[in-house]
Amino acid sequence: MTTQTSLFDVFQVIDPRFRALVNTMAPLERIATGYTWTEGPVWFGDHQMLLFSEIPSNRVLRWQPGLGVSTFRAPADFTNGNTRDRQGRLISCHHGTRSVTRTEPDGARTVLADRHKGRRLNSPNDVVVKSDGSIWFTDPSYGIISNLEGYRAPQEQDGHFVYRLNPETGELAAVITDFTQPNGLAFSPDESRLYVAESGSSHDPSCPAVIRAFDLDSAGHLSGGAALVTVDCGLPDGFRVDSAGNIWTSAGDGVQCFAPDGTLLGKILMPERASNLCFGGPRGHDLFITATSSVYRIFVDITGAPSAGAQPAGT
Ligand code: MG
């Protein structure tokens, strides 16, 4: 049974386990609207603010409870995904400069990576930081195949890779090289697995709309990579993992939640296509969802996994 909270049923319970993760009476709130394609939500508990990217208008915006939306950065080099490192610093992917940057406490930006093997990256899309400080990001081509979300330009890399960056040394390694378009990524709570979304069906309908699971050993070696999650509407873009290891992913009909074994538990049905999400709010129980023209907030009865970049230590 679902609860009518709006013009449509927000929660779709598919597996009874989903009931423990949500409160079906919780309303879906639209907290910001009027945009074209929102992305990259990240919560700053120490500032009680949400940052999100508005890619086509080349801005990063700030939302604060009771205060609404203000501009954080504009122009923003077509920022897409955002997260925080273990020191709480903002880490961002940029289509415009085809780079990954770190924003220092004084607001200055440091370019962490913009080239691999001497050639420009494609257009870094989403990013996560592991507990050892390494920065993992995806590099599909969305920001260089059109002027909508960046600058159309030739691709210089041999493919669309997932990279691991050592921010201390600058060493950049292509660790996964067989995606059509890698997109969102996150670690399991114990960091023994890396999940990466395949969004290649955006341009190739034959490409499966899946999140693949890679095993990560203590030496940092990846193996496996089979599809774990299949999204049954649209495609997976950004996603997060909660503290129990469940995977909450964007999809064409809103947010879809999967158990660690890949079983679809339930959905948060939304009026717009979702692009990404993050956990946050005063107690960590708010799920912030960027979805096309708007940003939404909804209460969930679980918090994000710290290792998934949802809630850096101390915030
Ligand atoms: Mg993305």
Image (cartoon, helix red, strand yellow):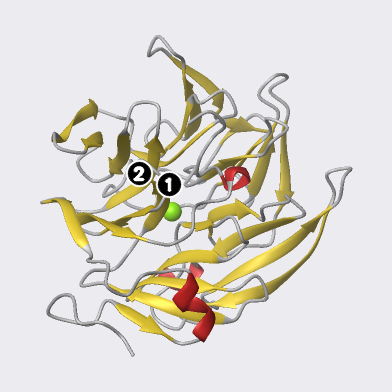
Residue 169 in view of the camera: yes
Residue 203 visible:
no
Tell me residue 129's x, y (percent).
Answer: 61, 38
Snapshot quadrant of residue 170? top right
Give the SS element for disc 1: loop
Residue furthest to the bottom:
1
Q: Give the class, few, some or many, for how many residues have Cα within 10 Å of label 2's Cα (few <14, many ≥20).
A: many
Name the kind of residue labelled 1 in the image: Gly
Q: Residue at x 86, y 51 (%)?
A: 217
Residue at position x 40%, y 9% in the image:
106
Q: Which quadrant of the frame does ligand 1 lie within?
A: bottom left
Vertical arrangement, residue 170 with respect to residue 176, above or below = above
* Residue 155 in the figure: left or right of residue 145: right
Q: Residue at x 83, y 44 (%)?
A: 220
Query: Which structural element holds mark 2?
Result: loop
Where residue 263 appears, as percent x and y from the top left, is 59, 81
Q: Which residue is mark 1?
A: 284
Q: Are marks 2 and 1 in contact (CB under 8 Å)?
A: yes
From the viewer's side, name the closer residue of 108 and 289. Answer: 289
**10 Å neighbourhood of mark 1: few (<14), some, or many (≥20)?**
many
- Seen as rendered, the residue at the extreme right is 219
- The spot of residue 126 in percent (x, y) is 49, 46
Mark 2, residue position: 281
